[in-house]
Amino acid sequence: MRSRAGCRVFCALGFAAVLLASRWALAPRYLITFDEINFALAVENFNPALHQPQPPGDPLFVMLLKLLSHATSDVETLFLSAALLVSFAAVLLIWAFGESLLGGAGGRIAALLLLFNPAFWLAALTNPVRLCYAAGATGVALALFQALRKHSERWFLVAAALLGVSSGFRPSLAILLAPLALWTGLRIRLGWRAAARAAFLFLLFVATWLPELAAAAGGWIPFGKLLRSYSYGETRATSILFGAPLGPAAHMAWEALVWSCLGALSWIWAIPWLARRNRGIGLDALTGRFLMFWFIPGLLFYATFHVGDADHTLSIIPAVCLTGAAVLVSLGHEFPKQTGAVAALAVALNVFLFFKPISQTAKASTYKPVRWLDGYMANLLDTVSDLQKQDKVTAIFYSPITGWRNLSYYFPEVQIIVVKAQDSGLPAGWLFRHKRAQEWSSKDGLIQVPSCGLLVWVDPDAQPNTTAGGPAMRRRYPVSFTRAAPGRVFDFRGFRFVAAPGDCSAAPYSGTRGERP
């Protein structure tokens, strides 16, 4: 017994060490994603109405960040710590799940498949809140599986409580796991009274975070409007449910399939081998249906409603990892002495899939865009830091160019002008300073910029054109910069900018301006 306990401790420490090494070695220098900055701002001031963080708000993850912030003042260390903590929780949960399904070897293989799954690895480096999909979904599914296997009302109540808690980290988990919970309840013939107790327990735990979330957003009615507006904005271009064209909707469905199943390529090769030897994949029919009711409704949600990034699919990826563990354990029965080698091969293939894109769609689930974004953001922030030592800086962005949210967080004293085109063709956008945003719009097509200090145009591909005779335009990737001068005119991305004569604090608008709601 002591030997088994010692082995489990050794394995847990091994998982922790591999997790730490693999994530810390690749951790970006700065927070590189828009969402990370939203959460960093939420640690200072939790307000989903200001996208601090973006709706629906994920209040329990913000609470976790606030708790961890007492241990470090470095925001990058804070987010890496949260990523490691949630990742380790997910690995331990799938290890326990795999053991209950497949025995000790199956649990360890399932843990390794999740630990090195491309989307799981990606989330730790770019958006740790999405790791809560994996941890929350695995915890709830494990409790539901115990309820199914033991025909236990008590375990079903545990699952309901866990779903209420995990939804505070990612509210959409309640929707994603509802079909699995419903199927499990029907399968174990859960009575009406037991179902009512489970619903009450779920709502009781939701009540610990939902009222505070609504209050932070300005109340129930503003919170509802905020959710509707945000959901529509996120889904209208790609969701067939919201009238998106068939092409973009089909592309999103393909992304959902590729991103959720990419890790399966590390073990799916074993299925034909097993089939030739008339062996199954190591799952009984009931367990197979359980995993199907976990995976398929989630995939349909992502394929038809919304999947923006590869790590959105982490709520269903653990089901893929458990299936893969079953396949590899079944293969190990054919070659008992090579079980470790089979698991090592699957891990190596997962590592390959993370570092080497096999298609344009799969690329979004790999390290390649992380490396590019890390370099881009480091160059941007380091360059602005150097320029700030020379003079006051005004940075200008065309809205599709990333980095303005990050720059406003790391350098709140820098004035940032973000420009977008309206349907009328006239420019509009936001003005950021001291982490506050103002909306502006132009009535004459001209955008005013300060007439002194340094003007910094952020774009990795384009440079502004300017009138001759002024200070020289210089280039340092990903920015172009020059000294401002009164009356100077610039053309950039189809917009015209003019330095207001005699005004060093010119607002970037020629028309109306107002506080961002």
Image: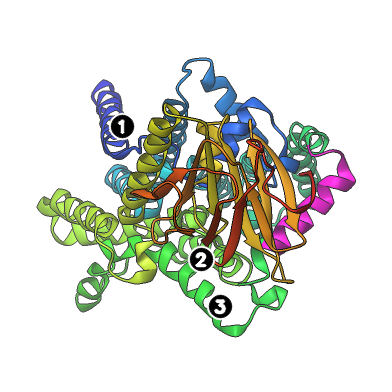
Q: Which mark is first along the chain, 1 or 2?
A: 1
Say which amino acid is labelled 3.
Answer: Pro
Q: Quadrant of the N terminus?
A: top left
- Residue, disc 3: 248
- Residue, disc 2: 292
- Secondary structure of the residue carrying numbered label 3: helix
Q: Is residue 401 left or right of residue 155?
A: left
Q: Which mark is residue 506?
A: none
50 vs 173: above or below: above
Q: Quadrant of residue 157?
A: top right
- Secondary structure of the residue carrying numbered label 1: helix
218 vs 489: above or below: above
> What residue is drawn where x is 32% and y is 45%?
375
> What residue is drawn where x is 23% and y is 68%?
270
Q: Main secondary structure of the magenta part?
A: helix
Q: Which mark is first along the chain, 2 or 3?
A: 3
Q: Which mark is residue 20?
A: 1
The answer, for residue 129, to whether it is visible in the render is no
Q: Residues within 10 Å of mark 1 (few under 14, many from 20)?
A: some
- Mark in front: 3 vs 1: 3
Looking at this view, is 191 or 304 the one in front? 304
Q: Residues within 10 Å of mark 2 (few under 14, many from 20)?
A: some
Extent of the magenta region: 217-233
* Mark pair 3, 1: CA separation: 38 Å
Q: Quadrant of the C terminus?
A: top right
Q: Position of residue 447 (x, y in %)?
A: 66, 55
Color theme of the render: rainbow
180 vs 98: above or below: below
